[in-house]
Image (cartoon, rainbow, N blue to C red):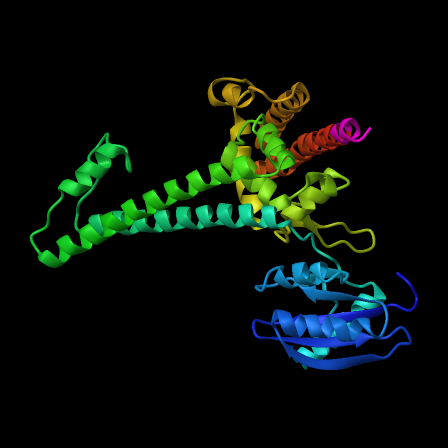
């Protein structure tokens, strides 16, 4: 950045934004507080622009990226900062909006802040939809537990040989009756909630399918290619793409592993090296789906059934990478299982699995970029 540029720190809240600016000469001063409204922000940017070049930053939080997109639309450079990586003084016990804004401006000028990736509106819309489906699954699980525990307290158990939550199981639950009206009302309510949760998930999954069709071509291509890997269905692939964005933004697969929070923690000093459990300092949604997919690699490598169907229409390069993943990860699972518990083994397999996911994603994204460039050359020779 230029020497004369000013650094503006924004402490953003639901109703207000505290503003501070770090001047090139060293002064850091507060500009007060403005309402968190589009018109107030526009007037602030106009006032700052009159004083010369500047750039803004604010912490990622519950207000999302609306402010970022508004500033970009106004032509204002802006970055969104990772809150957990903002430097903090150990002895500082005073926290106010004004001081937070000044600290952001000062640290931004010093280069001590870590920007986060800002998703495009299409990515964020798909991510919100996928997370809504995940929340619906959690609600369905809670509703099912309430119903089963209620029946258990009444001494009613699922008949032997009957699988729970099948159509037959639902018919059996509907046929149950209790002498007391209060208990019958409770059963009816719990059963209705389970049915409501099921229909909610069906609606969301249909919406996800429609969103994939309407997604940008590169996003659709990556979602399709990732399904060539064992354990990655359409929903899992969509979750990965919506949570990560462009996989090529990571220069090395280790960066993607770190982003998921599945790398070991470490506390080393001098000649002593100590590594512990995974950091979990990353995207929990990505870590969850990868952990679920990693269990599939306990089986010997093969391509049958749904996996064979998912690989139809996928590039041969992606299929080759997926097969290498099967061979490598199954072998690693067997080796690690001899000396570690299964959960640790699956965590390690999931971490390595991210490397193959990165490889497929980067290959597809670069192929799509070359295809787009070729089309532009044909259109504008």
Residue 230 drawn at (x, y percent): 55, 27
Which quarter of the rendering shows the N terminus?
Answer: bottom right
Residue 105, by quadrant, is bottom right
Where residue 149 sits in the image (x, y, percent)?
26, 50
Q: Is residue 227 above or below residue 91?
A: above
> Left or right of 101: which side holds 200?
left
Q: Residue at x 15, y 55 (%)?
A: 185
Residue at the left extreme, as displayed: 179
The answer to whether 101 is drawn above or below residue 349 in the figure is below
The residue at the point 83 percent across, 63 percent down is: 111
Q: Percent position (x, y) of residue 112?
A: 80, 63
- Where is residue 298 shown, x and y percent of the image? 53, 27
Magenta residues: mostly which secondary structure? Answer: helix
In front here: 219 or 316?
Answer: 219
Q: Is residue 268 left or right of residue 261?
A: right
Most foreground residue, 266 or 339: 266
Asked if the stretch drawn in magenta spans residue 239, the answer is: no
Res 109 quadrant in image: bottom right
**Is 378 part of what is drawn in magenta?**
yes
Q: Hey, which quadrant is residue 59 in on the image?
A: bottom right
> In the rendered structure, which segment of residues is drawn in magenta?
374-381
At 89% from the left edge and 73% from the top edge, which residue is drawn?
24
Task: Classify the position of the C terminus by image quarter.
Answer: top right
Please say whether residue 291 is visible from this viewpoint.
no
Q: Across the whole image, how many numbered discs are drawn on residues?
A: 0
């Amino acid at each position: 950045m230029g020497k004369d540029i000013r650094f503006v720190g924004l402490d953003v809240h639901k109703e207000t934004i505290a503003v501070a600016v770090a001047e090139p000469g060293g002064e850091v001063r507060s500009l007060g507080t403005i309402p968190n409204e589009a018109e107030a922000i526009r007037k602030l940017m106009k006032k700052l622009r009159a004083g010369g070049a500047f750039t803004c930053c604010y912490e990622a939080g519950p207000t999302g990226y609306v402010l970022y997109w508004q500033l970009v639309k106004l032509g204002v450079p802006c970055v969104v900062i990772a809150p957990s990586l903002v430097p903090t003084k150990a002895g500082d016990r005073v926290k106010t909006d004004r001081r937070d804004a000044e600290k952001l401006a000062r640290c931004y000028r010093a280069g001590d802040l870590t920007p986060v990736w800002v998703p495009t509106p299409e990515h964020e819309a798909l991510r919100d939809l996928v997370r809504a489906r995940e929340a619906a699954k959690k609600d369905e699980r809670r509703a099912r537990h309430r119903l089963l525990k209620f029946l258990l307290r009444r001494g009613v158990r699922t008949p032997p040989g009957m699988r729970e939550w099948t159509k037959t199981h639902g018919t059996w639950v509907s046929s149950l009756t209790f002498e007391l009206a209060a208990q019958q009302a409770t059963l009816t309510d719990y059963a209705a909630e389970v049915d409501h949760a099921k229909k909610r998930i069906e609606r969301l999954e249909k919406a996800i399918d429609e969103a994939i069709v309407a997604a940008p071509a590169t996003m659709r291509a990556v979602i399709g290619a990732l399904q060539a890997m064992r354990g990655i269905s359409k929903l899992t692939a969509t979750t990965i793409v919506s949570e990560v964005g462009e996989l090529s933004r990571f220069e090395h697969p280790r960066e993607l592993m770190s982003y998921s929070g599945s790398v070991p923690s470490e506390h080393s000093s001098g000649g002593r090296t100590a590594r512990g459990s995974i950091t979990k300092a990353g995207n929990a949604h990505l870590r969850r789906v990868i952990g679920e997919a990693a269990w599939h690699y306990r089986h010997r490598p093969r391509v049958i059934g749904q996996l064979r169907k998912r690989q139809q229409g996928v590039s041969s390069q992606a299929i080759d990478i997926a097969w290498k993943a099967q061979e490598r990860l199954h072998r690693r699972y067997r080796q690690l299982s001899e000396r570690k518990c299964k959960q640790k083994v699956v965590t390690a397999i999931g971490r390595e699995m991210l490397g193959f996911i990165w490889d497929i994603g980067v290959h597809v994204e670069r192929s799509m970029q070359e295809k787009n460039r070729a089309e532009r050359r044909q259109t504008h020779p």
